[in-house]
Image: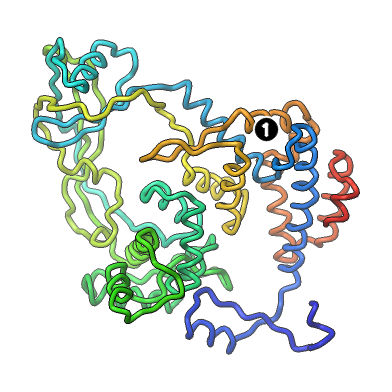
Amino acid sequence: MMLRPYVSNIARIEFHEVTKKAIIDAITNPRTISLSMVSAQLVRRIEDRWIGFGLSQIVQEKFGRKTLSAGRVQTPVLGWIIERYDESRRDKVYSVTVTLSNGVKLRLNIPPDKEELIKALKAIHRNKQAEVEVKIEVTKVGEEEEELNPAPPYTTDALLRDSANILGLSVEQTMAIAQELFESGLITYHRTDSTRVSTVGIGIAKEYISERVGSDYFVGRAWGGKEIGAHECIRPTRPIDSDDLRNLLNTGLLQLTIRITANHLRVYDLIFRRFMASQMRSARVLKEKLKISIYLNGANVHEEEVERVSKILEPGFTKIWGYIEGREYQELTPGEYGVSSVDYIKKVSRTPPLREGDIIAMMKERGIGRPSTYAKIVDVILKRRYALVVGRRTRYVVPTNLGRQVYEYLTEERKEFSDLVSEERTRIVEKHMDDVEVGERDYMDVLNELFNEAMSKGILKENVINQT
């Protein structure tokens, strides 16, 4: 709107990938600026300042620290972290990884009341002679064929979750890498909640799958194809897998403005495989339910069940995507085995603390936050030292005493603020913004409601209003 006095012909171009074709198409097909979308963004920015700045100043004054903050999304997310951590401390089991006499590794969850078994396993772990003989019997208790459908291509939340859980990268690392991959023209826009695949994307998948896997494996899917004007999913912009990309860079045939690291290639590979799998045939597998029985001196002292993919009958999308449940037990077969070693034994929670990826998934599932803010919210909580990331292989997010104090102050000590930072309140505000965006509500009506509520709670001071 600032350009209006100087030029009357103002349009918006939209592109989801930094490629020559996409940008030329965008310039060729401009569209008018949606004033309802502009209004929704105004509501979002103003509300963030009224609530976020106002509550942050109150928290800073209370605790005497200028680095603290609060907000309508940040605070309920902090509450999830605290709630899950407290739950994790109440429900403990022993997580045990053993190597069987046939060389296959097996993970077990042993309740803490199985004291004699735990004592024997700890002795084996310390390479000492156990006082009792430990045997493990694996029996098949069920079997069925199952059709597995590929997952849709990545949205922001799904990418952050898998990158954290599969690759072990923080959400901040993943978003920084995705930003650089996007700016380099290797992937489409990475802040999106849409699974939509354009005809261009389907064509890229068809070319790669037909040449590398076989044309009979290709099944083009638009996924969220009915979403008009929506962002696309996160996908590669070319039919180039991570090995091809590495070779092109090493030979100098492809030159980028960024330095591609091993983590760039890992994230790109994840995006590429997930997208290609989404355009492939379903798979058929044979799944077995196995019962694991542990014996001490011949007495059955513990049982648990696992599911394994015993055979892939029709590979389908698993030709490219290998992250399917039960795949890790593929080598586990029925029989009776000794225990060669206990590789790991530790008391852990049956309900572990949240991982960064879990938090992102909850934000998407519960309807608070946006693809552009998922990673930022987690990052702010960590930078404020409201929570810490612990663990090497698996990164868990646990609350600090400071995080607890701030959360309890906003939700219990100052009860007048509790509804402002509740999960339900955040969902309602997001709904108001969506209604403004599609023209169902006037943005000034929403702002007046928010203003009156903030004034009644006493969180709007003159300096906050002036900053809006």
The answer to which of 134 and 341 lies nearer the viewer is 341
Q: Is 202 drawn above or below residue 369 in the view shown?
A: below
- In the picture, the quarter occupied by the C terminus is bottom right
Residue at disc 1, secondary structure: helix
Rendering quarter of residue 37: bottom right
Tag 1 residue: 407
Judged left or right of residue 255, residue 109 is left
Rendering quarter of residue 322: bottom left
Q: Residue 279's spot in the image, x, y percent? A: 34, 67
In percent of the image, x 85 and y 57: which residue is there? 445
The answer to which of 88 and 252 lies nearer the viewer is 252
In percent of the image, x 21 and y 23: which residue is there? 125
Q: Is 427 drawn above or below residue 3 in the view shown?
A: above
In percent of the image, x 10 and y 27: which residue is there? 337
Instruction: Give the total number of marks visible in the rendering.
Output: 1
The answer to which of 314 and 317 lies nearer the viewer is 317
Judged left or right of residue 268, residue 133 is left
Q: Residue 116's spot in the image, x, y percent? A: 24, 11
Looking at the picture, which amino acid does disc 1 mark? Tyr
